[in-house]
Amino acid sequence: MTARFKTSLMLIPLSMALLSCARIWQIVSSLTDVSRLFQNLWHVPIKISDSYDCHQNSTIEILSIDPFVMYINNFLSEYEVNHLLEISHDTFEQSPVYDESLKTVVDTRFRTSQSSMVPKTDIVGKCLSWKMKSILGNIQHIDTEPIQIVKYEPSERFRIHMDWFDKPRNRTYSRKHPKRPYNRLASIFAYLDDDCTGGETYFPEVQGVSRVADGEKFSRTESGKGLLIRPRRGNAVFWNNLLPNGTGDPRVAHAGLPVHTGRKIGINLFSHYYYDAPMVGGDEE
C-alpha cells in the first residue's frame, strides 16, 4: 500500500511515552482543545478498493503514560470484524511461540490458543496496517508484521510474556529488505469476538484502573494492582514495547488470561523498529 499517512498531532500519544513525565504534562497543558484535535486526526479515510473505504473512526483513552498504554474504542468497524471472522473460521492451527533462538515452536504449556494469518493481500489487513502506522505518526513505522488472528476456547490461555525479542531478529517480512535487524516497537491487540467470560488481557506491572472505570471494558484485581482489559468486540489496546534506547521494556509483560466460558477471538498487530534508522523523526524507508 502506498498511501501517505497524515502524521500531524497523531504522533502525540506514542511520543509521550518517549519523553519525561514533566515534559509530557507541559505539552498536554499547552493544548487548548486536545479532544477536537484528536477527533479531526482520527477521521482521515483511505481508499482501499472500490467497495471498501478504510476509516479511522476511533477514540482513545490513555491508560498509562510510562510505560505507554492506551485503549482504542471502535478500532475495528463491524465490516472489518465480520470479514476477519469469515476468512479465518476454518484456518486455525495451534499457536506458536518463539524459542531462545527465535524459531517458532508449539509449546502448549505456555500458549494454548489457535491462530491464523491474514494474507498480505487482504484489503482489511492493509487497512489495519495503515491504521497502526497512522497512530505511530512521527515514530518509526516503516513496516508491520502480517496480522495474526487468535482464538481462545474455554481454559485456553497465553501465559505472561513479552512481545519484544531478547535480541534483534534479522529475518524480516519485507521483500524490500528481507534481512535487517529489528524488534517489535508497538503492539495492538484488538477484539473480534467477546462472547466469553474471562479472557482478560492482563498487564501485572501496569497500574490498574480506578474503581469508577468502565466495568464493561476494564476489570480490577483483588489487590488493585495490574491492568485488566476485558474483551470488547471492535475495541483494542495499544502499547509501546521498547525503551528509547531500543531495548525491551519488561513492564509491558502481559498475559491472555484463561477463557472460562464461550470463546474469545482477537488479532495481533506488531510494528517493527529497525535499529539502523531513527526511532523518532526519521524519514520513512
Image (tube, rainbow, N blue to C red):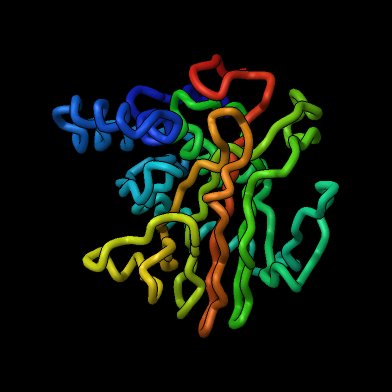
Query: Residue 45, image x and y in percent?
Result: 38, 34
**Which residue is more in the foreground, 77 or 235?**
235
Could you tell me which residue is drawn at 55 percent across and 67 percent down? Answer: 265
The quarter of the picture where the N terminus appears is top right
Query: Residue 32, image x and y in percent?
Result: 14, 28
Left or right, 77 with reference to 256: left
The quadrant in which residue 221 appears is: bottom left
Vertical placement of residue 191 versus 14, above or below: below
Could you tell me which residue is drawn at 66 percent across and 27 percent down? Answer: 274
Q: In the displayed image of the protein, which residue is found farthest to the top?
A: 283
Could you tell me which residue is drawn at 21 percent across and 33 percent down? Answer: 34
Query: Residue 241, image x and y in percent?
Result: 56, 42
**Which residue is more in the foreground, 27 or 265?**
27
Left or right, 175 with reference to 25: right
Asked if residue 168 can be seen in this view, the reply is yes
The quarter of the picture where the C terminus appears is top right
Left or right, 112 with reference to 263: right
The quadrant in which residue 113 appears is: bottom right
Vertical placement of residue 103 versus 278, above or below: below
Q: In the displayed image of the protein, which residue is found farthest to the bottom?
A: 261
Could you tell me which residue is drawn at 43 percent across and 52 percent down? Answer: 76
The quadrant in which residue 40 appears is: top left
Vertical placement of residue 19 versus 108, above or below: above
Left or right, 104 with reference to 233: right
Query: Residue 82, image x and y in percent?
Result: 49, 61
Asked if residue 123 can be seen in this view, the reply is no
